C-alpha cells in the first residue's frame, strides 16, 4: 500500500471517530437554547384620539328659540254681497297683485237695475233741461211785464200773473235739478253694489287658500272666499324669557334654520319688540322679518324654524371639539409623542365646537378621547379623528 492511500484511510477513520462527540456537543447546545427564558415584550403605549386645531368660517352666540314662519301680511277676502260664483280668476298658489279680480259673482239682476237707474238719470236730465227752458221763458215774460207795468202799459194783475209763473218755473227747475242729483246718487250707489260682485285682491301676494271653491257656489258676507298672504317678506314671532329681556335689541341679526331645508341658513332682523311682558308665559314677544324674495321664495308660511338671535359674532376663530376642553379650561396637547397640559381661553360654542381665544395655535393636536388614562409627560400613541 502506498503512502497516499494510507494517509486517506487514517483521515477517514478520524472523522468517523469524531462524529459522535460532535453530535453530543450540538445536542447539549440545543438543549441549552430551549431551556433559556424568552426576552420580555416591549410595554405598549397608551392610545388616544386627537383632533387638529382648525379655523371655522364664523361663530355666532346669542339667544336660541323656535318659531313658526308666517306671511308678513295676510288677508281673508269675504264678499259684501250674496251671489253665486260665476268665474274663479285665481286658485291656491297663484300670485296676485293688489286690485286683481280673483272671483266674479253672478250680477245679472244688479246689472239690470244699474241700467234702469242709468236711464232714470237720463230722463231726469231731460226734464231738467225742459224746466230750464220754461224758466227762461217765464223769466223773460216777468222782466217784460215789469217794464210794461212801470210804463203803465200793463195792469198789476198781469204783472202778478207773470211773476207767479216765473216763481213756479224757478221751483220746477230746482226740483228737476234735485231729481237729477238723486237719480245720479242712486246710480252711483248701485254702481258700488255692482262692483262688489267682483272680488279683488286687497294686497299683492300668494293665494294661500281658495277653500276649494268652484263655479256655482253661493257666497255671502260670512263666507271665506280666498286667503292671500304677502310672501316676499316673512315674519317669525318669537317669545323670549323675561330674564333675557335686556339681551333683546331692535335690528338684532337673526339666523333661521329649517329641518325641511337642511344645510341652509337664512337671515333676518328683529323689527319689532312688544312693549309689555306676557303675564301668562312670563315672556316678551318680538318679530323677525326675513327677506324671502332674496332667498328665492323657498320659505313657506307655516314652516317650523330654529332661531338664533345673534349677540356676538367672531370670524375665522380657532376651534376644537367641545369634548377636548376640560372643566378647568385646559386641554391635553400631544407634542413630539408626549402629553402636555395647556391652559386655554375658551370662547363661544357652536355646533359641537368651542372657539379658542388663546392658548393654542393652528394645527396642534388636542386629545378628545382617552385623556383620562394619561398625565402630563406620558408618551402616547395617537390617531387623528375626523372632527
Image (cartoon, rainbow, N blue to C red):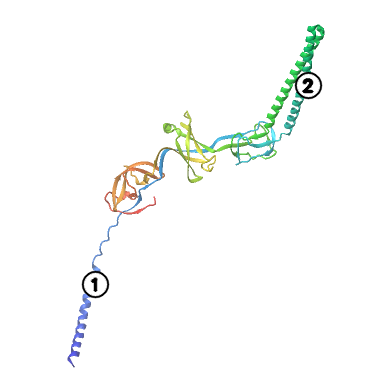
The answer to whether 211 is drawn above or below residue 6 in the figure is above
Answer with left or right where residue 157 lies relative to residue 376: right
Badge 1 element: helix
At which x and y percent is residue 11?
A: 19, 85
Q: Is residue 64 above or below residue 179?
A: below
Cα–Cα span, label 2 and label 1 = 151 Å
The residue shown at (41%, 43%) is 58
- Judged from the image, the secondary structure of the residue bearing numbered disc 2 is helix
* Residue 183: image location, x then y, percent: 73, 24
Crowding around mark 2 (Cα neighbors within 10 Å: few <14, some 14 to 19, many 20+) is some
Determine whether 274 is above or below 363 in the image. Answer: above
Q: Picture coordinates of residue 224 (x, y %)?
A: 63, 35
Q: Residue at x 49, y 40 (%)?
A: 305
Quadrant of the drawing holding the N terminus = bottom left
- The single residue placed furthest to the left in the displayed view is 3
Residue 230: x and y in percent read 56, 37
For residue 110, which quarter of the picture? top right
- Number of numbered markers: 2
Q: Which residue is mark 2?
A: 130
Disc 1 target residue: 30
- Residue extending farthest to the bottom is 1
**Side of 365 where 90 appears, left or right:** right
> What's the residue at 79%, 17% (across, down)?
137
| Crowd rating for badge 1 (residues with CA inside 10 Å; few <14, some 14–19, many 20+) | few
Amino acid at each position: 500500500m502506498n503512502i497516499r492511500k494510507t494517509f486517506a484511510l487514517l483521515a477517514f477513520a478520524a472523522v468517523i471517530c469524531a462524529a459522535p462527540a460532535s453530535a453530543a456537543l450540538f445536542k447539549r447546545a440545543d438543549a441549552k437554547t430551549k431551556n433559556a427564558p424568552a426576552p420580555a415584550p416591549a410595554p405598549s403605549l397608551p392610545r388616544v384620539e386627537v383632533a387638529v386645531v382648525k379655523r371655522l368660517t364664523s361663530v355666532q352666540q346669542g339667544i336660541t328659540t323656535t318659531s313658526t314662519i308666517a306671511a308678513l301680511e295676510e288677508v281673508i277676502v269675504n264678499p259684501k254681497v250674496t251671489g253665486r260664483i260665476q268665474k274663479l280668476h285665481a286658485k291656491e298658489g297663484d300670485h296676485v297683485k293688489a286690485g286683481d279680480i280673483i272671483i266674479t259673482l253672478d250680477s245679472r239682476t244688479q246689472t239690470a237695475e244699474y241700467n234702469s237707474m242709468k236711464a232714470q238719470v237720463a230722463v231726469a236730465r231731460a226734464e231738467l233741461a225742459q224746466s230750464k227752458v220754461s224758466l227762461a221763458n217765464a223769466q223773460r215774460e216777468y222782466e217784460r211785464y215789469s217794464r210794461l207795468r212801470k210804463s203803465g202799459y200793463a195792469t198789476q194783475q198781469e204783472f202778478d200773473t207773470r211773476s207767479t209763473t216765473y216763481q213756479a218755473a224757478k221751483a220746477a227747475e230746482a226740483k228737476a235739478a234735485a231729481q237729477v242729483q238723486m237719480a245720479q246718487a242712486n246710480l252711483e250707489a248701485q254702481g258700488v253694489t255692482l262692483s262688489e260682485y267682483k272680488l279683488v285682491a286687497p294686497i299683492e301676494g300668494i293665494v294661500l287658500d281658495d277653500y276649494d271653491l268652484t263655479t256655482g257656489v253661493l257666497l255671502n258676507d260670512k263666507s271665506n272666499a280666498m286667503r292671500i298672504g304677502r310672501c316676499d317678506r316673512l315674519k317669525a314671532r318669537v317669545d323670549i324669557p323675561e330674564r333675557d329681556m335686556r339681551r333683546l335689541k331692535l335690528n338684532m341679526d337673526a339666523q333661521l334654520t329649517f329641518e325641511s331645508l337642511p344645510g341652509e341658513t337664512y337671515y333676518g332682523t328683529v323689527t319689532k319688540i312688544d312693549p309689555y311682558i306676557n303675564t301668562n308665559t312670563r315672556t316678551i314677544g318680538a318679530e323677525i322679518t326675513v327677506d324671502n324674495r332674496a332667498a328665492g321664495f323657498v320659505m313657506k308660511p307655516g314652516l317650523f324654524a330654529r332661531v338664533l338671535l345673534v349677540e356676538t359674532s367672531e370670524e375665522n376663530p380657532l376651534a376644537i371639539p367641545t369634548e377636548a376642553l376640560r372643566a378647568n379650561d385646559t386641554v391635553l396637547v400631544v407634542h413630539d409623542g408626549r402629553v402636555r397640559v395647556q391652559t386655554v381661553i375658551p370662547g363661544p360654542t357652536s355646533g359641537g365646537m368651542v372657539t379658542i381665544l388663546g392658548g393654542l395655535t393652528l394645527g396642534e393636536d388636542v386629545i378628545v378621547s382617552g385623556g383620562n388614562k394619561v398625565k402630563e409627560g406620558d408618551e402616547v400613541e395617537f390617531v387623528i379623528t375626523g372632527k
